[in-house]
Image: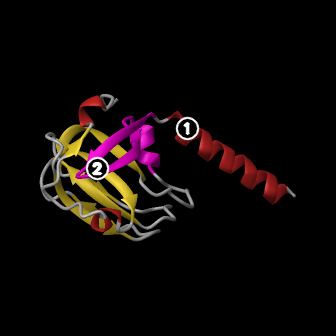
Amino acid sequence: MKRLLLCMSFCFVAASASAEMPLIELKAGKQTLTAEVASTDPDRMQGLMHRRMLPENRGMLFVFSNVAYHGMWMKNTFIPLSVAFIDDKGVIINIEDMQPHTLAAHNAKQPVRFALEMNLGWFRKHGIAPGTKLEGLDRVPAPR
């Protein structure tokens, strides 16, 4: 019973934390998606850790305070993901596939302002590749 309550408490806290992040609708090519916006240090550090699923056409947009060679890893992340690194103009620089529970770094090939994590293979499935421009980034909250 204690395990069940602990799990229920943890799931509630995790769901509450994700509910606090603003949502934004973005367009990549012809595909529309909804992304939670991780624009604060705690949200960027938490990312999609500990989640067991990510709905189709749903992701997380990381907004960095500086343009740099940012990298991502998969510590405590259960969902296989693909990450698109995006420059200041909204253009995808590179896309990397990431496997759960690994500490391998997946890095931008050029300085970027954003990273968008989606389910593994989502970009490929929708014909979205480096060079594609995302629409809607002008409405993203400033990083804090």
Q: Nearer the viewer, residue 132 or 37?
A: 132
Amino acid carrying label 2: it is: Ala
Q: Which residue is drawn at 48% across and 64% down?
A: 79
Display colour scheme = secondary structure
Taking the magenta stretch, the answer to whether it contains residue 135 is no
Amino acid carrying label 1: it is: Ala
Query: Total marks drawn?
Result: 2
Residue 19 circle label: 1
Q: What stretch is highlighted in magenta?
A: 22-47
In the depicted structure, whether residue 23 falls above or below residue 126: above
Taking the magenta stretch, the answer to whether it contains residue 39 is yes
Q: Residues within 10 Å of mark 1 (few under 14, many from 20)?
A: few
**Residue 41 placement, left or right of 115:** right
Q: Name the residue under label 2.
A: 115
Of the numbered discs 1 and 2, the one sitting upstream in the chain is 1
Q: In which quarter of the image is the C terminus?
A: top left
Q: What element carries label 1?
A: helix
**Residue 76 placement, left or right of 89:** right
Gap between marks 1 and 2 measured at Cα: 20 Å
Q: Which of 65 and 81 is in front in this view?
A: 81
Q: Which residue is drawn at 28% across and 50% down?
A: 115
In the depicted structure, whether residue 123 falls above or below residue 26: below
Residue 31 circle label: none
Q: Quadrant of the N terminus?
A: bottom right
Q: Nearer the viewer, residue 135 or 111?
A: 135
Q: Could you tell me residue 78's position as x and y percent?
A: 51, 65
